[in-house]
């Protein structure tokens, strides 16, 4: 399907352009404002906030509303968090959390 | 280069995960290295997989890209772009200014790096990321991966891990709780526009908090 490929290529181009703009333009616009209290405050608090919101945003795709699937999701999220909190090995946490969820979903969907 | 090596090694398996998800979502495997090379923003690429597979509108991708990568805007405050020479060098350096490249470049090990060393580090990271994604795509083609259910949980796990890392760097419970609160509230009220509404609400909360703290200080 050439239409589908064209659309995906367009999406990739848009994502790349916005990402580059966010990386390059601030050197001209934001860097002169590095002493601004507002800019510094946002820059220290944004990363944690954005990551936490994205984690919740991605949960939405998993839940079909059934109690069992929600339980598997809760177990996998808890396991990933505890593992990363105690071991801080990013790959290990992601791998074990995902493997657990896939296993639970395959055995008891 | 010793600081780059461990990060680069983590790029291969994570890139493989991206490649697997691309195939799992029903896209051609070669989209994985294309996403990796052209977008080159890890967490956004993982999100684009789902958006591309469902033929999401351009506006949705634009908004998502803006929110996910808004944090990069603040890297300009401290990334040593002044040491990178030439227009082409600066263009490439900003294009590939990923979280990891930023972390290495502002780290103590890179305090005296030349233009060439900074660019080489960025090229090495991008090269490894693209290689991992291509490997994952090919691996996904070879394995019956479509049958695995719930593989996209890797994306949730990735953000949980990144959030915990961000918390460790700046342990602030109020920030964490207000972000979670904004996201949950947006989920309940405007599930179709969760991300953009949560982001807007969170920004307002931060600004209000700053105003309150300055008022309390005065």
Image (cartoon, coloured by chain):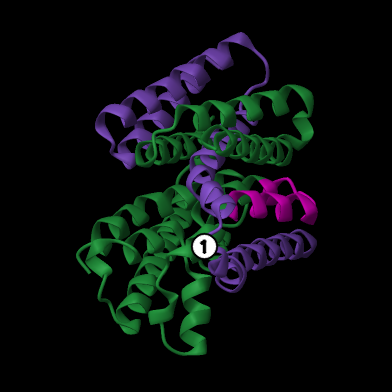
Dividing the picture into quarters, in which one does residue B195 lie? top right
Instruction: Name the one closer to the observer, A21 or A5.
Output: A21
Q: Which chain is purple?
A: A
Quadrant of the frame with the N terminus of chain B: bottom left
- Residue drawn 64% across the image and 31% down it: A61
Q: Is residue B68 magenta?
A: yes
Q: Secondary structure at mark 1?
A: loop
Quadrant of the frame with the C terminus of chain B: top right
Is B16 placed above or below A107 here? below
Residue A11 point in image, percent of width and height: 71, 60
Residue B13 shows up from this direction: yes
Which residues are drawn in magenta?
B51-70
In the displayed orientation, state which residue is furthest to the left: B2
- Residue drawn 67% across the image and 49% down it: B64
In the displayed orientation, state which residue is furthest to the front: B218
Residue B185 point in image, percent of width and height: 69, 24
Residue B2 point in image, percent of width and height: 19, 65
Is B154 placed above or below A15 here? above
Instruction: Name the one closer to the observer, B120 or B217.
Output: B217
Q: Is residue A28 magenta?
A: no
Q: Main secondary structure of the magenta part?
A: helix
- Residue drawn 51% across the image and 36% down it: B217
Instruction: Name the one closer to the observer, A89 or A26.
Output: A26
Residue A48 point in image, percent of width and height: 49, 40
Q: Which chain is green?
A: B
Q: Residues within 10 Å of mark 1 (few under 14, many from 20)?
A: some
* Residue B110 horizontal side relative to residue A59, left or right: left
Residue with the mark numbered 1: A34
């Amino acid at each position: 399907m050439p239409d589908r490929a064209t659309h995906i290529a367009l999406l990739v181009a848009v994502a790349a352009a916005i990402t580059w703009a966010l990386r390059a333009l601030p050197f001209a616009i934001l860097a002169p404002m590095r002493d601004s209290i507002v800019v510094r405050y946002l820059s220290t608090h944004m990363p944690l906030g954005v990551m936490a919101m994205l984690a919740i945003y991605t949960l939405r795709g998993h839940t079909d509303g059934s109690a069992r699937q929600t339980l598997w999701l809760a177990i996998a999220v808890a396991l990933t968090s505890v593992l990363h909190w105690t071991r801080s090995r990013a790959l290990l946490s992601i791998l074990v959390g995902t493997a657990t969820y896939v296993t639970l979903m395959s055995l008891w969907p | 280069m010793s600081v780059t090596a461990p990060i680069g090694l983590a790029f291969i398996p994570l890139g493989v995960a991206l490649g697997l998800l691309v195939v799992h979502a029903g896209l051609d495997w070669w989209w994985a290295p294309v996403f990796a090379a052209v977008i080159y923003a890890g967490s956004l690429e993982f999100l684009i997989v789902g958006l591309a597979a469902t033929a999401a509108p351009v506006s949705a991708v634009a908004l998502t890209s803006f929110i996910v990568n808004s944090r990069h805007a603040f890297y300009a405050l401290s990334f040593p772009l002044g040491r990178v020479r030439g227009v082409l060098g600066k263009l490439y350096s900003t294009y590939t200014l990923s979280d990891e490249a930023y972390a290495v470049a502002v780290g103590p090990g890179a305090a005296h790096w030349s233009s060439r060393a900074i660019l080489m580090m960025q090229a090495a990271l991008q090269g490894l990321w693209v290689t991992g994604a291509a490997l994952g795509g090919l691996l996904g083609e070879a394995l019956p991966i479509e049958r695995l259910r719930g593989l996209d949980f890797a994306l949730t796990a990735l953000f949980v891990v990144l959030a915990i890392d961000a918390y460790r760097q700046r342990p602030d419970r109020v920030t964490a709780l207000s972000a979670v609160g904004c996201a949950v509230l947006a989920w309940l009220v405007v599930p179709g526009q969760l991300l953009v509404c949560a982001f807007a609400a969170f920004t307002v909360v931060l600004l209000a908090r700053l105003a309150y703290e300055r008022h309390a200080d005065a």
